[in-house]
């Protein structure tokens, strides 16, 4: 069964199977390929070379660029058998997660056993911001499988890109020469804007230049439309947050009368309880005094002789007690 090479096995491939390798690009079970020096902007067919005057590339929103890897891969059997006798190697290429987080779409592909050359792929910017990549920046992850006995192919890779280094344009044969326009099917509708634009492009000078300009403006309108859609989504999210805060404040205002009524009710109950307690204490004290006087003859005579003074003192005591009980207790300081 095929096994994935670990970091020790991958490091043993440096200098032979993986030429121009960098140990800092090594991962537990993969090697991260770096951006090479040559490529082409597919929207304008403009080629470039990095490493001397230019140090990186800029990809505009909606644009696509074809790039090459800095490292050269050699899966030829004579090279691999020097490290893994009786085994062949097969590779799986996938973009790093940094690319997808920035809206860069890149293909996942494979490297057949027997391949030798430089790897090419494309980067498409689907975001609304310009993306920049520097020469030899780590962008593509290479996972290598060691094929066991019975999995090695009889026919090794021998395609159009074998032995090629640097950036190589597509070698697809394409359609045969001489096919008429009415033999092709496309998305344009009869009398639609696409048909009118194509008629301008085929009309020759100066209409051809006008058609090209309209085509460029159409692409710019699409970018503006995408940016407007993002702004609209941001406004919708902001409106939702404002509505949420407003509803929260309305609920707080609605609950304020209930809170006031509850506090007033609690205070009224507290005052009523204090009044009842005070009245009960006065009545109990008066009853105790009457009982004591009537049960003791000397005391009864004393009260009868000095009743006016005693009554005045009792009245003053009642007033003092009532004031003390009715007074609202102070709240402790926080």
Image (tube, rainbow, N blue to C red):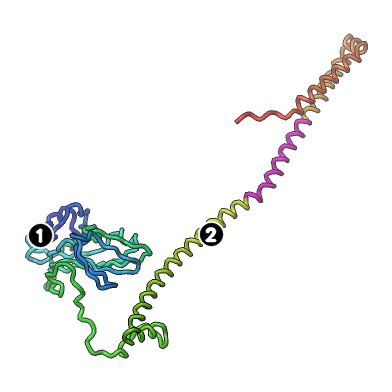
**Residue 189 location (% of width, % of height):** 40, 85
Compared with 306, 78 (above or below) is below
Q: CA distance from mark 2 to mark 1?
A: 59 Å
Q: Nearer the viewer, residue 247 or 126?
A: 126
Marks 2 and 1, the one that precedes in the sequence: 1
Whether residue 303 is in magenta: the answer is no
Residue 318, position as x, y percentages in the image? 82, 22
Does dot 2 land on a helix, a strand or a loop? helix
Tell me the crowding category of disc 1: few under 14, some 14 to 19, or many 20 or more residues within 10 angstroms, Cα based: some
Q: Position of residue 9 (x, y in %)?
A: 15, 55
Q: Viewed as shown, does residue 142 lie left or right of 181? A: left
Quadrant location of residue 313? top right
Q: Quadrant of residue 41?
A: bottom left
Which label number is shown at residue 326?
none
Q: Relative to 294, does residue 1 appear above or below in the rendering?
A: below
Residue under label 2: 239
Neighbourhood count class around disc 2 (C-alpha, 10 Å): few under 14, some 14–19, many 20 upward: few
Q: What secondary structure prevails in the magenta region?
A: helix
Name the quadrant of the N terminus: bottom left
The residue at the point 90 percent across, 13 percent down is: 303
Question: Disc 1 designates what residue?
Answer: 16
Front in this rendered view, residue 109 or 161: 161
- Specify whether residue 318 is in view: yes
Q: What residue appears at the point 23 percent right and 59 percent down from the top-left corner? A: 55
Decide whether residue 274 is among the magenta residues: yes
State the quadrant of the C terminus: top right
Magenta range: 252-275
Q: Is residue 193 left or right of residue 245?
A: left
Q: Position of residue 71 (x, y in %)?
A: 16, 61
Q: Can residue 148 be spotted in the picture? A: no
């Amino acid at each position: 069964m095929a096994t994935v090479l670990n970091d020790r096995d991958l490091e043993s491939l440096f200098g032979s199977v993986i030429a121009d390798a960098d140990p800092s690009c090594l991962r537990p079970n993969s090697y991260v390929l770096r951006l090479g020096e040559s490529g082409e902007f597919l929207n304008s067919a403009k080629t470039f070379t990095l490493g001397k005057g230019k140090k990186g590339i800029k990809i505009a929103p909606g644009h696509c660029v074809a790039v090459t890897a800095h490292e050269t891969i050699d899966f030829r059997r004579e090279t691999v058998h020097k490290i893994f006798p009786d085994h062949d190697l097969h590779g799986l290429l996938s973009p790093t997660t940094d690319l997808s987080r920035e809206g860069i779409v890149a293909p996942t592909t494979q490297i057949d056993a027997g391949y030798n050359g430089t790897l090419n792929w494309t980067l498409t910017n689907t975001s609304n911001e310009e993306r920049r990549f520097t020469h030899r920046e780590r962008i593509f992850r290479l996972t290598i499988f060691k094929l066991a006995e019975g999995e090695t192919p009889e026919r090794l890779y021998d395609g159009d890109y074998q032995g090629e280094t640097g950036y190589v344009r597509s070698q697809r044969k394409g359609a045969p020469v001489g096919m008429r326009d009415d033999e092709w099917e496309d998305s344009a509708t009869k009398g639609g804007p696409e048909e009118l634009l194509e008629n301008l492009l085929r009309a020759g000078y100066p209409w051809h230049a006008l058609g090209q300009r309209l085509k460029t403006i159409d692409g710019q309108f699409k970018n503006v439309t995408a940016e407007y859609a993002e702004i609209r989504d941001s406004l919708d999210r902001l409106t939702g947050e404002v509505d949420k805060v407003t509803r929260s404040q309305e609920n707080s205002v609605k609950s304020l009368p209930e809170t006031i009524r509850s506090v007033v009710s609690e205070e009224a109950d507290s005052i009523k309880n204090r009044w009842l307690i005070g009245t009960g204490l006065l009545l109990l004290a008066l009853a105790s005094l009457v009982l004591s006087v009537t049960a003791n003859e000397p005391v009864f005579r004393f009260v009868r002789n000095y009743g006016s003074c005693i009554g005045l003192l009792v009245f003053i005591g009642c007033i003092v007690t009532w004031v003390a009980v009715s007074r609202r207790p102070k709240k402790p300081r926080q």
